[in-house]
Image (cartoon, rainbow, N blue to C red):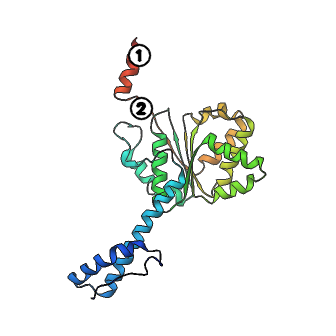
């Protein structure tokens, strides 16, 4: 096989071909590849590079406060979460089936970490995802409503396969905010997925939203097709030196 150059790879917007074609050609000659094997290897490199680049673009689009992965999660510390259960979620069947994932538990137990980690996994495997706190989503929808385009905004969000709703329960909602949050959940019911984290049990959500009847309808839509994971124990941020410091303050 003669040496190969790719002067037009830039025009094809295939930079990885330009980077690897010559190296692969040398390997092809050394190992006696036929033309089909060489072409398959070059194209495989380009596809892999595009998938990786696209995945990182989707991670940036998601607007995570920071990138977390399942490899970073301390299952040995957070024993209330079964590693096998989370790894099953990481296969993303819930996303393909348009189901939700809900993490409930005290602050600092890893709810946000797992929410982001699953979403990062989804982004790197080709799904568009987007992150915001519950208050952030309500603020976005309130702005759209004020501009007379709430339905348009809900439809736009509906085209994103996975939304992460963090910190439900940290700030009580007024009636309008509660109505907008209900609209978000309802618009995605059986159409696309949510990952929701809350420091409150469902029985306490009436305190957040103020209307027990509306909360019942909201929770019904949210959990009808959902994996609910309840996290217990002390907060991860209190372990080690931080825990000793707080305990010391308590003794003083």
- In the rendered image, residue 43, in percent from the top left (x then y), is placed at 39, 77
**Which residue appears at 72% of the width and 38% of the height?**
213
- In the rendered image, residue 62, in percent from the top left (x then y), is placed at 54, 53
Q: Residue furthest left?
A: 30
Give the camera-side residue of 106 and 17: 17
Q: SS for tag 2?
A: helix
Q: In this picture, is 236 found above or below 248?
A: below
**Which residue appears at 43% of the width and 78% of the height?**
9
Query: Position of 228 compared to 33: left or right?
Result: right
Q: Residue furthest top?
A: 252
- In the rendered image, residue 141, in percent from the top left (x then y), is placed at 70, 47
Give the camera-side residue of 147 and 114: 147
Residue corresponding to mark 1: 249
**Which residue appears at 74% of the width and 55% of the height?**
151
Residue corresponding to mark 2: 237
| Location of the C terminus (image quadrant) | top left
Give the camera-side residue of 234 and 166: 166
Q: In this picture, is 45 found above or below 170?
A: below
Query: Position of 92 compared to 151: left or right?
Result: left
Query: Position of 3 compared to 199: left or right?
Result: left
- In the rendered image, residue 132, in percent from the top left (x then y), is placed at 58, 45
| Location of the N terminus (image quadrant) | bottom left
Q: Residue furthest front?
A: 7
Q: Is residue 247 visible?
A: yes
- What number is the disc on residue 124? none
Q: Is residue 44 visible?
A: no
Give the camera-side residue of 240 and 4: 4
Nearest to N terminus: mark 2 or mark 1? 2
The answer to whether marks 2 and 1 mark residues whose Cβ atoms lie closer than 8 Å is no
């Amino acid at each position: 096989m003669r040496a190969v150059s790719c002067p037009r790879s830039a025009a094809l917007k295939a930079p990885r071909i330009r980077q690897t074609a010559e190296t692969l050609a040398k390997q092809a000659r050394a190992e006696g590849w036929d033309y089909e094997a060489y072409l398959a290897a070059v194209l495989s490199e380009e596809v892999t590079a595009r998938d990786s680049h696209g995945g990182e673009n989707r991670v940036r689009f998601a607007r995570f406060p920071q990138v977390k992965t399942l490899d970073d999660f301390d299952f040995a510390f957070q024993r209330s979460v079964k590693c096998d259960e989370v790894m099953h979620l990481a296969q993303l069947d819930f996303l393909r089936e348009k189901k939700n994932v809900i993490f409930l538990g005290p602050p600092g137990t890893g709810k946000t970490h797992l929410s982001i980690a699953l979403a990062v996994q989804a982004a790197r495997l080709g799904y568009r995802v987007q992150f915001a706190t519950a208050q952030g989503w309500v603020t976005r929808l309130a702005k759209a409503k004020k501009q007379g385009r709430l339905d348009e905004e809900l439809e736009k969000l509906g085209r994103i396969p996975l939304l992460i709703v963090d910190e439900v329960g940290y700030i009580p909602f007024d009636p309008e905010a509660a109505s907008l949050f209900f609209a978000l959940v309802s618009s995605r019911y059986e159409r696309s997925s949510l990952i929701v984290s809350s420091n409150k049990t469902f029985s306490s959500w009436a305190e957040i939203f103020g209307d027990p009847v509306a909360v019942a309808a909201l929770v019904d839509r949210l959990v009808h097709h959902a994996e609910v994971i309840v996290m217990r124990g002390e907060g991860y941020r209190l372990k080690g030196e931080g825990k000793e410091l707080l305990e010391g303050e308590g003794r003083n």
